[in-house]
Structure formats: structure tokens, C-alpha cells
Image: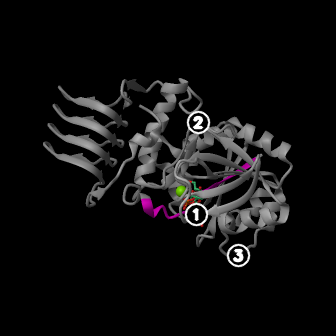
Amino acid sequence: MKALLLIGGQATRLSPLNKHIAKSLMPVCDREVLNYQIGQLARAGVSQIILAAGYMVEQLADYVSGYSGGLEFAISLEEEPLGTAGAIAHAAELVDNDRLVVLNADIISDVDIAEVITTHEAGGRPATLVGYAVQDPARYGLLQLEGSAITGFTEKPEGQLDDDAKHFINAGIYVLEPTVVNSIPQGRSVSIERETFPQLITAHGALTHFPHERLWEDIGTFESYFRANFALVASRYTYGDNALWGGREDFALFKDMVYMHESVELGKGVDLFHRVIAMARSSIGADSRLQNTILLPGAVVGERCQLTDCIIGPGVSVPEGTRINKMVMVAGEQNTAFYPDAHDMGIS
Ligand code: GDD
Ligand code: MG
């Protein structure tokens, strides 16, 4: 079976954090989003992965060239972005009339893709979409449901929705029959969310829904990137050494949601108060206090700093005595404001 990763967005909402890194290679607790996705697809029996990409393609090609274990990779290059369905149509020759699993390349989840495929087969419809329940669907695709059938799809719904209700949104994980891939118009930009899914629903009455409840986050904004990291840590607390952690032993978890890679250096009197992720080769100087903060690989925090609600980019040096909150710091860039909503992660 084949899978296609939609990897061609410009990822502007994460800028400048991802300035030198393709969005899908951003590390979440020291592993690239792509790494989690490849593992997830391999566990479901996928043997070939098509990367539908247009930006930073060399970086992606380099990354997958290091993979072995029977997985085959192909790159479907877009000179111009063709949209989420246009990218699939562009890769139709590589798909070659197979059933296709499609993933947005900016999500991390513990969805069991093999189960999604089983549900897809039982559903007997041309497409199956994974749904995830959230409070506010505004920045997602909203699924309209009747039992296990998807009878409507609204991308980025506007207007007031019942505040207390949970809404199933498009998690960016699909199984498509070859008829779907072959019916997407070629040679122009096509959105799977705004064009293909609504048309399929009109033509077939409904698509199949696979509801997912545990871990799911996209990493498209500072806030969701932040949440994704802590949601992953929470998954380890809740489910132990689950498939996403895959037997890793190169880190430690401490109380209050503190994750630390084994290579991190800590000065004397460092206070990791609550929710701290310190990725590989980062260091924290003496008497510094961190709260609700992520250090990307190689970030260096000086002595006597106080960082609250921050993301410190790869290799950034935070001068001693710095006191900041609600900031994203990236080397050579102005600090960018950041509004984490950690309380919304459903974890203590
Ligand atoms: N190859 C290719 N070509 N990929 C693309 C293109 C394109 O023209 N445009 C977007 N992508 C990729 C992005 O890189 C990303 O991995 C995925 O498609 C989704 O695009 P985003 O730009 O991240 O969309 P979004 O986050 O606003 O919304 C999408 O994801 C939500 C879940 O995170 C939609 O699919 C929503 O319906 C969904 O709820
Ligand atoms: Mg996205």
C-alpha cells in the first residue's frame, strides 16, 4: 500500500521558527514530525511513501535517503503549489491506481492507520477521513456528521458555533480509493477541503468517518507546535512507552511535565518549574528558572534567566539575566509574541 504526504505548504504561520527547517522536519521532543509519520505508516503496512513537496525539497530528500527497512520513498515535485488535491493529482502516476493513505505532513497523532483502513473497507465509500473532537473548529475543516457518515465538510467555518459543544474536525488523515485520485482535475490548483470533499459528498451522499480521541495536534502555529510537544509528553505519562516513543531511552521525564534529553546540561540551582521541554544539546545556566517553555536543539540559556511561556529556537543563545515571557526567540530575528494556551491541553 502507498501513502502520500502533503508537504508543500509555505508554513508561514510558523515563521521564523522554521526558517531553515522544513515544517515537517521540525522536532517534537527531539524527533521530526516526519519521523513519527513514517513510523506510523510503516506500522500500518505502507511500503511506499510519496512526498508531495515544493519547498526545501533537498532537505526532505536528504532526510528520507537515510531510511532503510524496506520503505521506498518517491518525491512528487511541484514547481508551483497545486493545492492539497492538486498535489495528489500531480502524483497520480506514482500512485498508479492503488488505494492511497494521505497525511497532512504537519500533524502528530497516535491514530492507528491500520484501523482506519479497516473502517474504510467496511464503510464501502470512496474516501474515509479521520475526525478529531475540538472545542473551536475555526482554523480547521469542520465535519458534519450523521452517525458514522460525513455528510458535510466546511473548511475554516465562520460564525458562532455552540461554545460548549465538541466538534469533529478534519484531522488531515485520509484513505482514498483510486477513483478519487483519478477524478481530481490535473494542471490547476485544487483544494481537497474546499473542492474535492464537498463534491464527493454531493456525488455519493456521504464519506466515512473514523473518530480519533487520543493524541492529535498540528504544528502549524507557534501555539499548536507548543501544544504538540506537551501533548506528546502527556501521552507518555498516560500510556507509557507507546508506539510514538518507540522504546526511546535517550531522555528523562520528571514530574510536572518536564522532558529533558540526556545530552542537556544544567547549571547549579536551575529551577524547571512546570512544563519544560529541553531538547538535545540545549543547556541552562545556573540559577535560571523556566516555566512553560521549550528549548529546541542546541539552545543555550545563560545564568539567572527567567523564561516563562517561551519557545527558544535551535541554537539560540539567551544572554544571562534575561527575563522574558510569551516570546519566540530565533537566531538573527526579532522576538515574536506568542500566546500559549497550555491550560487547554487537557493535562495537569
Ligand atoms: N504538496 C502540497 N501542495 N502540499 C500542500 C499544499 C500544496 O499546494 N498546500 C498545503 N499543503 C500541505 C501543507 O504543507 C500541510 O502539510 C497540509 O497540506 C495542510 O495544509 P495547511 O496549510 O497546513 O492547512 P491548514 O492547517 O490550514 O488546514 C488543514 O489541516 C487541518 C488540520 O491541521 C486542512 O486540511 C483542515 O481541513 C484540517 O482541519
Ligand atoms: Mg496545517
* Classed neighbour count for the residue bearing mark 3: other residues with Cα under 10 Å, few (<14), some (14–19), many (≥20): few
Q: Quadrant of ligand 1?
A: bottom right
Look at the image and give the residue range highlighted in magenta: 2-13
Look at discs 3 and 1 and give the one toward the viewer.
1
Give the number of the disc on residue 214: 2
Is 236 colored magenta in this rendering?
A: no
Label 2 vs 1, first from the N-terminus: 1
Give, as a three-letter code, the residue at label 3: Gly
Depth check: 143 or 80 in front? 143
Q: Residue drawn at (37%, 48%), measured in percent from left and top?
A: 340
Say how the picture is coloured. Answer: one colour
**Residue 343 appears at what percent x and percent y?**
40, 40
Give the number of the disc on residue 187: 3
* Displayed quadrant of residue 252: top left
Give, as a three-letter code, the residue at label 2: Arg
**Residue 242 appears at what percent x and percent y?**
57, 27
Depth check: 86 or 210 in front? 210
Q: Is residue 311 left or right of residue 140?
A: left
The answer to whether the residues at label 3 and label 1 have Cβ atoms under 8 Å apart is no
